[in-house]
Image (cartoon, helix red, strand yellow):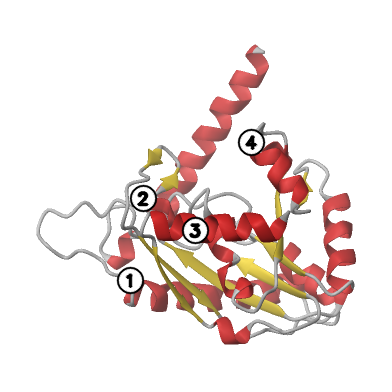
Amino acid sequence: MYYPVVKAFLGIFKLWRINVDCVGAEHVPTSGGAVFAINHTSFLDFIFAGVPAEEHHRYVRFMAKDAVFAHRIAGPLMRGMKHIPVDRSAGAHAYDTAVEALRAGEIVGVFPEATMSRSFDVKDFKTGAVRMAAEAGVPLYPEIVFGGQRMYSYHHRDFSRGHDVAITLGEPMHPTTADDPEEFTAQLRARMITMLDETIARYPVPREAGADLWWLPTRHGGTAPTLEQAAVLEEEAKARKAAKRAEN
């Protein structure tokens, strides 16, 4: 199912005049397993993050929360493309499935921030991406996707035509089981912060007076929440969800 779905989305890109600027696709390995560690700012990130690999006729198996697989529309697509469901309360099975896929020569896409960044900056990372790359003995590629939040993110939907999306795939990193996962994850995050800065530098940011830059990180002149403010918003959202579950 993966091939027709990819072709369908490429057609949607053209129909909606989505301008995809992809840098670094030459780093995609032509064969063998690899982990793509991707920042997370949009519900559409998994669509755009696969673009560099698709240019080389390779596909990415994404790790996504199991709730997505229960969705009446997204669920059949996710299962058909053999993406990997993650139960956040018991993630060992998903981790083992990902390592097995990597050893079988597949590319696995991971969002180390776990949840979307409300600041559109790079949040703290979980160590899973580094650990699975080390255990499987495969390279780890940092990847930045920027712009999807302007179409579909928390409390925002805009599917009008002409949006811009910038993608940057970095050179591979090579964690091993001898490396400290926390330290290597810190190196990965630092690399991806630099890559985000480089990606935003080439992104067409409106600079006219009064432009609404809610989707741009504050340290780049935008009005998005800071990382600290976003952390508070995330905790408030978790509390609301917990209260709703308790009511049910």
Tell me the distance, in whole angstroms, between the alpha carbons under discs 2 and 1: 20 Å
Report if residue 204 is visible in the image.
Answer: yes
Of marks 3 and 1, the one in the foreground? 3
**What's under tag 1, amino acid-wise?**
Tyr
Q: Relative to the observer, which residue lies in front, 231 or 81?
A: 81
Of marks 2 and 4, the one in the foreground? 4
Q: Earlier in the sequence, mark 1 or mark 4?
A: 4
Taking the spot 83% from the left edge, 44% from the top edge, the residue there is 90
Report if residue 127 is visible in the image.
Answer: no
Q: Earlier in the sequence, mark 2 or mark 1?
A: 1
Q: Residue 34 lies in what quarter of the image? A: bottom right
Q: From this view, report whether residue 74 is shown above or below residue 129.
A: above
Instruction: Kindly identify which residue carries mark 2.
Output: 225
Q: Around disc 2, counting alpha carbons within 10 Å, would you say few (fewer than 14), some (14 to 19), or many (20 or more)?
A: many
Q: Around disc 1, counting alpha carbons within 10 Å, would you say few (fewer than 14), some (14 to 19), or many (20 or more)?
A: some
Q: Which x, y percent locates residue 152?
A: 44, 46
Q: Which x, y percent locates residue 114?
A: 63, 53
Taking the spot 60% from the left edge, 20% from the top edge, the residue there is 243
Tell me the distance, in whole angstroms, between the alpha carbons under discs 2 and 4: 31 Å
Instruction: Kindly identify which residue carries mark 1.
Output: 203
Taking the spot 76% from the left edge, 48% from the top edge, the residue there is 80
Instruction: Kindly identify which residue carries mark 3.
Output: 11
Of marks 3 and 4, the one in the foreground? 3
Q: Which x, y percent locates residue 117?
A: 49, 52
Of marks 3 and 2, the one in the foreground? 3
Tell me the distance, in whole angstroms, between the alpha carbons under discs 3 and 2: 34 Å
Tell me the quadrant of the picture where the C terminus can be found.
top right
Q: Earlier in the sequence, mark 3 or mark 2?
A: 3
Q: From this view, report whether residue 229 is shown above or below residue 204.
A: above
Say left or right for 9 vs 18: right
The answer to the question of whether label 1 and label 4 lie on touching residues, with beta carbons closer than 8 A, is: no
